Each structure stands twice: as C-alpha cells, then as structure tokens.
Amino acid sequence: MPKVLIIIGSKSDQEYADKCKAQLESLGIDSSLEISSAHRHPERTAELTGGAEKAGFDAIIAMAGLSAALPGAAAAHSNLPVIGVPLPAALNGLDSLLSVVQMPPGIPVGAVAIGSPGAKNAAILAARILALKHPEIKKAVAEHRQSL
C-alpha cells in the first residue's frame, strides 16, 4: 500500500495536516504525520526526509508558513516527489508561497494553493502521482473527480 509522509513545522499547523490526511484517507492512501521544523530541528528533518523512501513512503507533503523552508529542506534530502503547501503567516501566506516556489534548479518542489485548499490539493496531487503505478488509486482519483 502506498504511503505519504506529511511534515509540518509546528503543532500550530496541525489543522492543515488533518485536512490533508483526511483527503488522502478518502482516496485510500495511508499517511504518517511528523512535526519537524527545518530551522529548529534541521537534523531530524534531514533524517525523516532522507530516510523516507527507505521507510516505505512514496511521496512527501511538507507544509510551512513564514520562511516556508520545510518543503525545500525535504526536497534537498530526498528524491521522492515533494509537494509544498504554503501556510498563512505573514502577508497572508504570499511570502510562504514565494518561498516554496523559489527553488534552485535540480531541487524541485511542487507547489499548491495557500492554506486549506492547498492542503487538500496536495493530497489529490500526491494521489495522482501514485495513481501512475497503483490502479486502485487511479480509480479513487477518477471517482473523486466525478463527484465534484
């Protein structure tokens, strides 16, 4: 069964992670949530993301506000697809969005909308990526889209 690692920088971001996790579950995808700040816990973040593939994860969703370094840090340590969710902080999340999309060549992060819509879309985007290898997820994604 495919799995997605969801990482948030602090407990205050939990509400967004919960929406993402619920969306993944509705599509039949297992996930695990970790709290690890790119700034306060850089070694832990590197271990989590660098070991994610070996731990059985197929994608990483990283959510962050303010400097929004967490998605980039995840992409720096992993070859798995990383989806960044910018969270509202200063400037209503525009600063977070710009941080997520301004990655150097060779270290891509897929970016989605700011906040709750982005949290849900990150789950759907991860499902679409996983659907390339998993017919049951492809079916769930198609059914979800049909229900909209």
Image: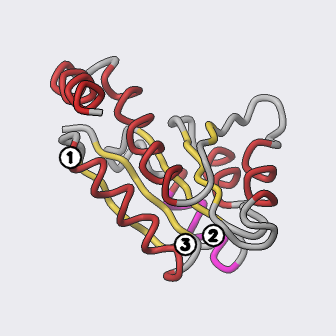
Residue 146 sits in quarter: top left
Camera-side residue: 125 or 144? 144
Q: Gap between marks 3 and 1, in whole Å?
A: 25 Å
Residue 13 x, y percent position in the rendering = 52, 74
Q: Tell me the residue that label 2 is attached to.
A: 43
Q: Tell me the residue that label 3 is attached to.
A: 36
Q: Residue at x 62, y 54 (%)?
A: 114
- Residue type (three-letter) at the residue carrying disc 3: Ser
Residue 15 sits in quarter: bottom left
SS category of the residue bearing label 1:
helix
Q: Gap between marks 3 and 2, in whole Å?
A: 9 Å
Q: Are marks 3 and 1 in contact (CB under 8 Å)?
A: no
SS category of the residue bearing label 3:
loop
Mark 2 or 1, nearer chain start? 1
- Pick the quarter of the image with the N terminus: top left
Residue 52 x, y percent position in the rendering = 44, 49
Q: Tell me the residue that label 1 is attached to.
A: 26
Tell me the magenta residue range.
40-48
